[in-house]
Image (spheres, coloured by chain):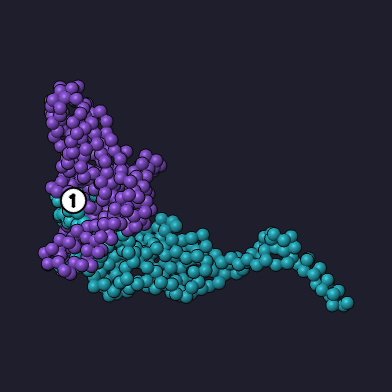
Amino acid sequence: MKADVPTRKKIKLNWFKSKCNLTIERKVVIEYNENSVTYNKITWDVLVKYILTKEEDPKEIPTGSPITLYKGGLPFLFLSTSASIGNKIISEELIDSDITIDDDIVNVSEGEDKVTYEDAKNPKEHIEVRTRLDKISRKISLENKLDNEITLELNFKQTKDVTFIKSQPEPSIVEEPNFKYTIKIPSEQKSSVIIDLQAKIVKRVTRIKPEYLKLEENRLNQYKGQ
Amino acid sequence: MIYMLIDPKVSKLIIFNGGGGIVERKIKLSLNQGLNKFEIANVPASFDPNSADIQLEFLDHADKNSIKLQQTIVSLPDKNTSQQIIDREKSAATSIISYAIDFTRELREQVSNICEASSYRTYADMKGVFDFIINSSKQGEVIVKVIYFIADLRMKWQTTLQVDISDDGNNAEIEGFLIVDNQTGFSYENVELGFAIFELPSTEMEIQNYDGFDNQMEMAQEAISGLNKQKKTQRMRNLML
């Protein structure tokens, strides 16, 4: 390609033009810890990325190149590239503000405390460990505010403290620790998933050992007697 | 020894998306018997003296033994002196602009162009020295190819993509454009362009000094010499030539 590159100027050159296939990938990853699983309300962000599969020879596109998406001759979305692999051009991931996810607690059934003790640094003290297994139900409501149907992948990722029991509907793919749901939501409609979880709630309190507590009481009484 | 100032035409320019590039210039030279010294004109001070290279292309294969490159001489202009010249020019430009109202319209445009050019000038726009000596045992001709890196972040390229989505939302037409940004003081006319995805190492510090001149050249040179010190591979990928 031959061109003039004048000083202190920008030049624009035509590079390629081709047809391509457009795929829109939307996903949300839901993950709790022992605290967040008991929150009344959580909101999650849906990440969206655009994948363009070129028909002709692949082109190497540098990361961060701007992409302007046009629909009906008007620009409607400004993105930038995150990678190009073969003839695939992949955009950066963005938060899709037209898809909202509200995650509300439905039910909590507290388990019984199981008390164990651990050594503390101070030999007069020990750590009281109260462990209980709670059963928690959460309802994840997804709303599509777009004027077209969307498909998104909801991935519940279980952690050491919060494990999966069951859900309504059943996950499409189970690859522990991931429980994936492929959800189709028509335009301006809502969909929901109810997940039953088991949360391991552990509380640790450092206390004076009972034998030392008695000695302390005796010493206090002696002091009062004086 | 004959001495000649030459200005080989830039035949190829490979631009890095991270800034800088490789310049390839070509010229056919007539040689006298003995030593022939040439000075290359219009070599920017942003060129890397260590990577500067001269390659001889012989018109006749037999010339290989009779025409030899004896040596190259490279140097960069003194930084302090160059800066003083730049400062003086900028100050003069400011004074001229102040009185530009007195010029006629045509003259005013010309003057403001000159003043604008001087206000953008940096050390990288000054001229470097790139001489070479060819030892020839006979009169003859040779094609000389001059290659050097330029470590100037003001020259770079980027792509921009326009995607027109069809009504069904599954198909689209994609159009790719290359945007070449040349904010250096050098023009390249009818040049074969190449585009490479490449970033000179340690450019972060250079970018910080993009507007201010301080140590830009020194760091740019370090950046090029640092190419061999990189632990991770950093391969240049050509898009087109």
The residue beneath circle 1 is: B187
Q: Position of residue B57 (x, y in %)?
A: 17, 31
In this rendering, is residue A43 above or below B93?
below
- Quadrant housing the N terminus of chain B: top left
Q: Which chain is cyan?
A: A
Left or right for A116, reference B183? right
Going by the numbered disc 1, the residue's amino acid type is Ser
Instruction: Name the foreground residue: B241 vs A80.
Output: B241
The answer to whether residue A191 shows anywhere in this view is: no
Q: Residue furthest right?
A: A226
Residue plotted at (30% across, 40% down): B75
Q: Which chain is purple?
A: B
Q: How many numbered badges does the structure rendering display?
A: 1
Residue plotted at (24% across, 36% down): B131
- The chain letter under disc 1 is B
Residue plotted at (18% across, 36% down): B4
